[in-house]
Image: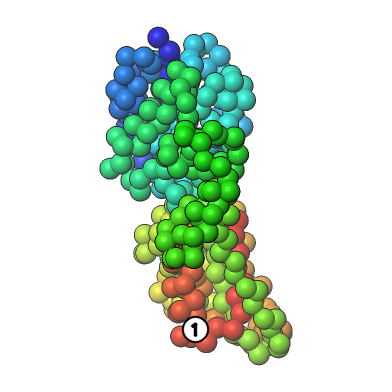
Amino acid sequence: MKKAVIYINQFFAGIGGEDKADHAPEIREGLVGPALALNLGLGEDVEVTHTVICGDNFMGSRREEAIEIILGFLKDVEFDVFFAGPAFRAGRYGSACGFICEAVENQFNVPVFTSMNDENPGVKMFSKKMHIFEGGKSAAAMRKDVGKMAKFALKVLKGEELLTAQEEGYFVRGKRHQRWLNPPVPATERVIDMLLKKINGEAFQTELPIPEQDLVPIAPAVKNLSECKVAIVTTGGIVPVENPDRIQSASATRWGKYNITGLDTLPSKDKECTVDTEYKSYKTIHAGFDPAAADADPDVIVPLDSLRTYEKEGRIGSVAEYFYTTVGTGTTEAEAKRMGEEVAEHMREIGVDAVIMTST
């Protein structure tokens, strides 16, 4: 009987959510969380013997250490295939699955499989390197997503014929293989068939798809900065200490705008704010970096102090009444695009001419 190992995060191990995201790597004998469904899907031919667990923050902020620990665990484990996830739309989890799968494949030369939603940033990071199966948006798709991985893994382990990425259900890896059709169809007939369908407006599938690119045109240069209203946008997660908009610390779907009228600097929780403003202190809720410096001085992420100096010197016309904030780590392209459009609409309403965007 073949043996398998699965990697999951602290949430799906039942350890906890964000409060336990720093959970150090561990390995457990037997089935934990998604390992139960995977073991069932693999049937009698493959047994999941161990579950590897690691907190998303631990893997994200201490990746080399986490991978070294996990590879150390696996040196004493006999296994023929490695799984990770499914990660659904969870960005940190997706990247963690990709990094550990890559490391395991390189170290132990066994097939590795994971699953993510198409909006997971881990897809673009790792789809060319490994089999990533197209997964659902949330854990509601757990059984289906695990089933896809299990079915394909069994075919690989048994040496059965493998079909195309579209037919098997994983993201295209950009690898081309010669494939004999049964019955055979010459290339001339296939291309003429595609051409006729295209002429007649019928659906057809090219044999060499070209990836679509969402190109954003470059904005025209600012003609006179001394007359511009300049706004600050950040993905560094600077928010009022209360985090009134409940912006997530990773994989964000929310953003906030906060009035900075009358403020020459963004106050921290350790500094008394003497200006009559709605929020008296700020911090970062970003889960992807050490928050100490940003919490001590939010201006290192939102450079309000520097822009006020430029405003007084006449280098810029004025600082916009609001700054705009969210968290970038793990945030999907679709959510980022939506939030960007919403922020831009508000900027138009208050007459912003230029933007300085900061990250971490």
The spot of residue 187 in percent (x, y) is 58, 45
- Residue nearest the viewer, comparing 41 with 157: 157
Residue assigned mark 1:
348
Residue shown at 56%/64% (left/top)?
A: 214
Q: Quadrant of residue 215?
A: bottom right
**Which secondary structure, mark 1?**
helix
Using the rendered image of the protein, determine whether residue 103 is visible from the camera's viewpoint: yes
Quarter of the image with the C terminus is bottom right
The spot of residue 157 in percent (x, y) is 46, 19
Specify the amino acid type for callout 1: Arg
Colour scheme of the rendered structure: rainbow
Q: Is residue 204 left or right of residue 108?
A: left
Using the rendered image of the protein, determine whether residue 5 is visible from the camera's viewpoint: no
Residue shown at 31%/37% (left/top)?
A: 144
Does residue 223 sit above or below 197 in this rendering? below
The image shows a total of numbered marks equal to 1
